[in-house]
Amino acid sequence: MVSNYYAAACQTSFDCPTHRKEIAERVKHMCTMIDHAVVGYEPFFDVRLLVFPEFAHAAPIYETVEKLRDRLALPIPNEHTHTYEKMARKYGCFIQTGTFLEADPEYPDVVFNTTVLIGPTGILATYRKVNPWIPWEVHASPHDFESYDRNPFPVVETEIGKIGVAICYDWLFPETIRQIAFNGAEIINRVSAYMDPWGATPPMDWWTLFNRARAAENSVYVVAANQGAALSGYPPFSWPGSSQIVDYDGRILAQADPGPHEKIVVAPININQLREERTRRQGHDMRAHLRSSVHTYLQTQGLRSGAGEHPLNFQSLRSRITEAKTKLSTNASEDGK
């Protein structure tokens, strides 16, 4: 068990690719970033965990699942995950990849937004975004199937700690991050493409707010890599970067300055200290103090599953949102009587 090491949040600033043939150059560049982080800091400390942003390989720039599958989506594993495996073996490190648009032959009318945790022994876990940024993202969620035989919230026990991950909009749902924490995570990576105005700049600094809150709520380290692309390269939004690493008390240990650019920020992870704090504390242990039986709202269905509606599209997503909002209003009125 390696209890003391450094993590790196690796912020990218690529132009948006239009075809999967452009992905290889991005992978090559991100491997160079891994070289820089591991080798550059070697005289000072060991960088063992590296996290990359959402859409680092490809973004959903086409409006339909059919076009995304035809032009950008890839199966997992693929030639690029094999390249990352070689880097992980070379340096004995763990790489949380930027997201791929994933095409799985088991789900022929679907595209997933997927990140992979890769270690020296190969692929350790695959995570598919549970809460796509609807209505603009037509990616499917594991929730969109009547039967889904994978754990939607995998946590992997490694020599550097128990690692989970969630993608961008997932972090606005405390239930998602809490489930990952209750599955055993000590480090939760945030693979993100968070756009302005919800970055690290007040008054709408949601990026910082939720990273810190989720870390403190769940007593976990958060390694958060955000997209740092300019509006000109990744329309229709600008991307504020501000990648950061937060400790289990919500303290920011390292942060990139706001603004579109490529950057690597590093900070220490001490798993033994985290475990000691979790064991010692009587107060402020929100996992142990959770009164789960009193919170009944999760028994009320919110957004219904998209099962039977694939391929997803903007219209079907908007219809489901409207339906959920109507139900929410009705339930609130009935509960208030």
Image (cartoon, rainbow, N blue to C red):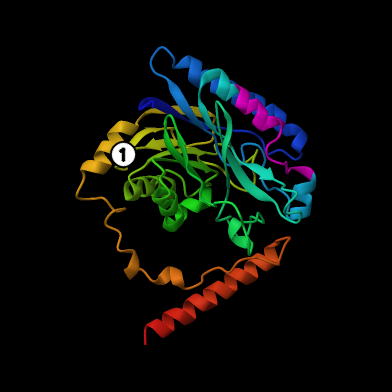
Q: Position of residue 56 (x, y in %)?
A: 61, 37
Label 1 SS? loop
* The one of 4 and 137 positioned closer to us in this rendering: 4
In the rendered image, the quadrant that contains the C terminus is: bottom left
Q: Amino acid at mark 1?
A: Arg
Q: Is residue 291 visible?
A: yes
Determine whether, in the image, residue 242 is placed left or right of residue 324.
left
Q: Is residue 64 above or below residue 33?
A: below
Question: Residue at position x 40%, y 26% from top?
Answer: 6
Determine whether, in the image, residue 335 is placed left or right of residue 92.
left
Q: Is residue 205 visible?
A: no
Q: Position of residue 141 (x, y in %)?
A: 61, 56
- Report how many numbered discs are placed on residues in the image: 1
Question: Residue at position x 42%, y 56% from top?
Answer: 174
Quarter holding residue 235: top right
Q: Position of residue 249 (x, y in %)?
A: 29, 42
Which residues are drawn in magenta? Answer: 71-86
- Give yes or no for residue 104 being in the magenta stretch: no
Determine whether, in the image, residue 101 is placed left or right of residue 40.
right
* The one of 29 and 139 positioned closer to us in this rendering: 139
- Give yes or no for residue 73 being in the magenta stretch: yes
The residue lying furthest to the top in this view is: 43
Question: Residue at position x 71%, y 35% from top?
Answer: 78
Question: Mark 1 = which residue?
Answer: 251
Quarter holding residue 7: top left
> Dot 1 surroundings within 10 Å: few (below 14), some, or many (20 or more)?
some
Determine whether, in the image, residue 108 is placed left or right of residue 132.
right
Q: Is residue 1 above or below residue 176?
A: above
Q: Position of residue 41 (x, y in %)?
A: 44, 17
Q: Is residue 306 above or below residue 155?
A: below
In the rendered image, the quadrant that contains the N terminus is: top left
Q: Is residue 50 above or below residue 68?
A: above
